[in-house]
Image (spheres, rainbow, N blue to C red):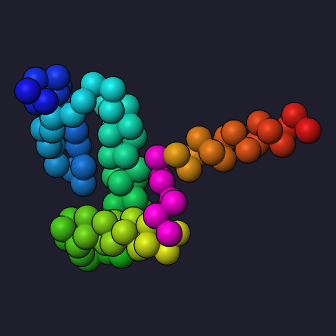
Amino acid sequence: MENDNLISANVWLAGRSYRIRIKPEEEEAVRKAIKLADDKITDLRNHYAGKDDQDFVAMCLLTYAADGATEGNTFNPLLDSDIKSMITKIDNIT
């Protein structure tokens, strides 16, 4: 069965703990995605005071959905920093 090789992980998002099941080889990417989302939610909290956490989570989701739609589904926030790092390394070589 496909669920047999899943691992359990506890993650924090918007101040709440969630228990998820993921493939071991995807754990690093999932944790990185959660960190990016949590950082975005924190940034939204700092700019839009007086809202509740559900509003910030919804705003974060909408931001990522809009980015994906306007970038023709080629934008991947998980790879963005890696790509920028590679470009910098290439620029430094030339």
| Residue appearing at x 27%, y 25% in the figure | 24
Side of 32 relative to 86 (left or right): left
| Residue appearing at x 52%, y 46% in the figure | 79
Side of 18 relative to 35 (left or right): left
| Residue appearing at x 22%, y 39% in the figure | 11
Comparing 53 with 70, the one in front is 70
Q: Is residue 57 magenta?
A: no
| Residue appearing at x 12%, y 38% in the figure | 19
- Residue 90 percent coordinates (x, y): 80, 38
Comparing 29 with 5, the one in front is 5
Residue 6 can be seen, yes or no: yes
Image height check: is 34 above or below 19? below
Which of the 4 image quadrants contains residue 58?
Answer: bottom left
- Residue 27 percent coordinates (x, y): 31, 31
Side of 6 relative to 68 (left or right): left
The C terminus lies in which quarter of the figure?
Answer: top right
The N terminus lies in which quarter of the figure?
Answer: top left
Prevailing secondary structure of the magenta residues:
loop
- Number of numbered discs on residues: 0
Residues rendered magenta in the picture: 72-78
Which of the 4 image quadrants contains residue 25?
Answer: top left
Q: Which residue is farthest front? A: 1
Image height check: is 60 above or below 37? below
Image height check: is 17 above or below 27? below
- Residue 41 percent coordinates (x, y): 34, 60
Side of 93 relative to 16 (left or right): right
